[in-house]
Image: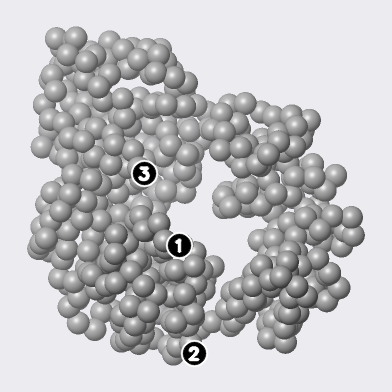
């Protein structure tokens, strides 16, 4: 990974959309970037926009929070008279990093004297995020100054919008505890594309009957919501509100609002208001703006019983849009998904654990109890841990050339021992092309690297060729390999060239907008 010097970071930030370009460059070491940008901001008040982007990652946020000089630097930047943009970004950073009443008072004082209109929305957002009695009182009393002319109209509307969201964020919210479903509900479970049969079979193990099985979802009827989370092969549990409503704010709000309110009252302890967010998926017609539709739905839905709180929500109103209509769902966040407690550390290319569980179920007819299993490109270890959860294994060995990946996997292994009882996982930092084992393994499972993870197509071809050539050393005769890759044409052609390897089963699926294949 490439480590940028401070001068290189400055040069990149001077380019148009510099901070976005740096964050989108997967070859840049983000930990090093985080440390250098933090130091640069503390010493020179430079890089605040990049700091905000970095802080979107919880891991980076925690890393930056460990620097005791950072908050004082933010407070200093907030007081700067030289740069309105710096004040705006400093306010946003303070909102991300602190809940201190003293910082709320600093933001209030800055808001009183701030004469640059585009800075005020960020000050309001920060006050809402910091919260506390002072912030709540200041937000309740604050009235945006009317626009002096047409040029200020846009900033005035942004200020009004920020004030509304900040007031909702700063409110003292009661924590509502899920007490169980009050009746049998239809619930839609999403799964990786073309792997719903694996989810259906898993549910049958728990005496749960599935219906309306589609390529990437199925439905169940149940009054035991928590019991669904015994299954590992689904990504989301969505409660259908209506499967076809007009794609207008009025139709959506009038349908969703009474359902959400009734559901929360009957299934949770405590009194309103209940906090929700709006998520729109799918493609909208060209004449409908996503942000404006969200705002219109919120304005029609919010009252003393339901509050739009995107930063602190209990339920999500999911709007799956199509050309002229939408499907509406409720997604519950008051029940934590604790199916994957080993997952403490992740990498950008880490496999979704539900997808890993489904992929292994796809191959389950060929997997054996008490197998010795190796993952030659293990990353943070997700596939191995899910293999250990599927059936008992004699050993789980992960190999990866990346020190960072092995560090993540070892942290996850410690968690797997404590939370899942998986004690047989070990991780080795080595190049699989040089790795030696005393005897071959029963199974090889792998989410094969592709794209930037290996450099280019030629690098990918060399890796795949080398791995297949070593298959006879890594896997015993008659053993099984489960390979998951985007480079399926390449892999299939390479397998066909080798007489000692036979494709027993294959399937195309979908993950994060990509279409990998399982062999």
Badge 1 crowding class, 10 Å Cα cut-off, few under 14, some 14 to 19, many 20 or more, is some
Q: Of tags 1 and 2, which is closer to the observer?
A: 1
- Residue 137 visible in this rendered orientation of the protein: no
| Disc 3 element | loop
The reply, left or right, for residue 22 in relation to residue 450 is right
Quadrant in which the C terminus is drawn? top left
Q: Which residue is mark 1?
A: 290
Relative to residue 230, is residue 300 depicted above or below?
Answer: below
| Disc 1 element | helix
Relative to residue 429, is residue 407 depicted above or below?
Answer: below
Instruction: Mark 1 or mark 3: name the one nearer the start of the chain.
Output: 1
Q: Residue at x 27, y 19 (%)?
A: 490
Q: Which residue is mark 2?
A: 304
Q: Of tags 1 and 3, which is closer to the observer?
A: 1
Q: Quadrant of residue 507?
A: top left
Scheme of image coloration: one colour
Q: Residue furthest front?
A: 150
Q: Are marks 1 and 2 in contact (CB under 8 Å)?
A: no
**x and y, in percent, of residue 190 in the image:** 25, 56
Q: Residue at x 58, y 83 (%)?
A: 172
Q: Quadrant of residue 317?
A: bottom left
Q: Quadrant of residue 83?
A: bottom right
Q: Which residue is mark 3?
A: 512
| Disc 2 element | loop
The reply, left or right, for residue 436 in relation to residue 503 is right
Identify the mark at residue 110; answer none if there is no mark: none
Question: Disc 1 to disc 2, how far (Cα)?
Answer: 25 Å
């Amino acid at each position: 990974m490439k480590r940028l010097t401070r001068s290189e970071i400055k040069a990149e930030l001077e380019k148009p959309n510099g901070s976005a370009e740096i964050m989108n460059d997967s070859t840049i070491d983000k930990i090093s970037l985080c440390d250098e940008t933090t130091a640069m901001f503390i010493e020179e008040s430079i890089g605040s926009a990049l700091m905000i982007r970095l802080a979107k990652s919880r891991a980076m946020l925690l890393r930056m929070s460990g620097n005791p000089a950072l908050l004082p630097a933010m407070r200093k930047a907030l007081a700067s008279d030289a740069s309105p943009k710096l004040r705006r970004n400093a306010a946003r950073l303070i909102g991300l990093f602190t809940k201190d009443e003293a910082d709320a008072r600093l933001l209030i004082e800055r808001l009183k004297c701030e004469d640059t209109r585009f800075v005020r929305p960020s000050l309001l957002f920060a006050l809402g995020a910091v919260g506390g009695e002072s912030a709540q009182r200041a937000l309740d009393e604050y009235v945006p100054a009317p626009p002096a002319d047409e040029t200020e109209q846009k900033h005035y509307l942004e200020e009004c919008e920020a004030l509304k969201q900040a007031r909702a964020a700063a409110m003292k919210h009661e924590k509502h505890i899920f007490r169980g479903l009050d009746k049998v509900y239809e619930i839609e479970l999403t799964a990786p594309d073309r792997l719903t049969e694996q989810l259906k079979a898993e549910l049958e193990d728990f005496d749960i009957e599935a219906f309306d099985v589609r390529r990437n979802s199925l439905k169940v009827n149940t009054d035991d919501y928590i019991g669904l989370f015994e299954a590992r092969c689904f990504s989301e549990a969505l409660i259908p509100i209506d499967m076809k409503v007009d794609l207008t704010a009025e139709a959506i709000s009038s349908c969703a609002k009474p359902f959400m309110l009734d559901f929360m009252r009957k299934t949770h302890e405590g009194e309103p208001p209940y906090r929700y967010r709006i998520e729109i998926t799918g493609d909208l017609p060209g004449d409908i703006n996503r942000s404006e539709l969200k705002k219109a739905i919120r304005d029609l839905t919010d009252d003393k019983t339901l509050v739009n709180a995107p930063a602190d929500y209990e339920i999500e109103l999911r709007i799956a849009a199509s050309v002229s209509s939408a499907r509406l769902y409720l997604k519950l966040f008051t029940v934590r998904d604790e199916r994957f407690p080993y997952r403490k550390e992740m990498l950008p290319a880490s496999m979704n654990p539900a997808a890993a569980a489904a992929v292994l179920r796809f191959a389950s007819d060929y997997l054996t109890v008490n197998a010795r299993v190796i993952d030659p490109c293990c990353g943070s270890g997700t596939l191995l841990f899910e293999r250990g959860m599927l059936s008992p294994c004699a050993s789980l060995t992960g190999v990866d050339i990346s020190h960072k990946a092995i560090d993540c996997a070892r942290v996850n292994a410690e968690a797997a021992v404590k939370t899942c009882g998986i004690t047989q996982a070990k991780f080795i930092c080595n190049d699989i092309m040089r790795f030696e084992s005393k005897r071959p393994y029963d199974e090889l499972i792998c989410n094969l690297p592709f794209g930037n993870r290996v450099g280019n197509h030629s690098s990918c071809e060399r890796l795949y060729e080398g791995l297949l050539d070593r298959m006879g050393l890594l896997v015993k005769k008659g053993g099984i390999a489960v390979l998951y890759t985007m480079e399926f044409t390449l892999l299939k052609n390479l397998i066909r060239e080798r007489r000692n390897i036979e494709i027993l089963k294959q399937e195309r699926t979908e993950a994060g907008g990509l279409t990998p294949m399982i062999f």
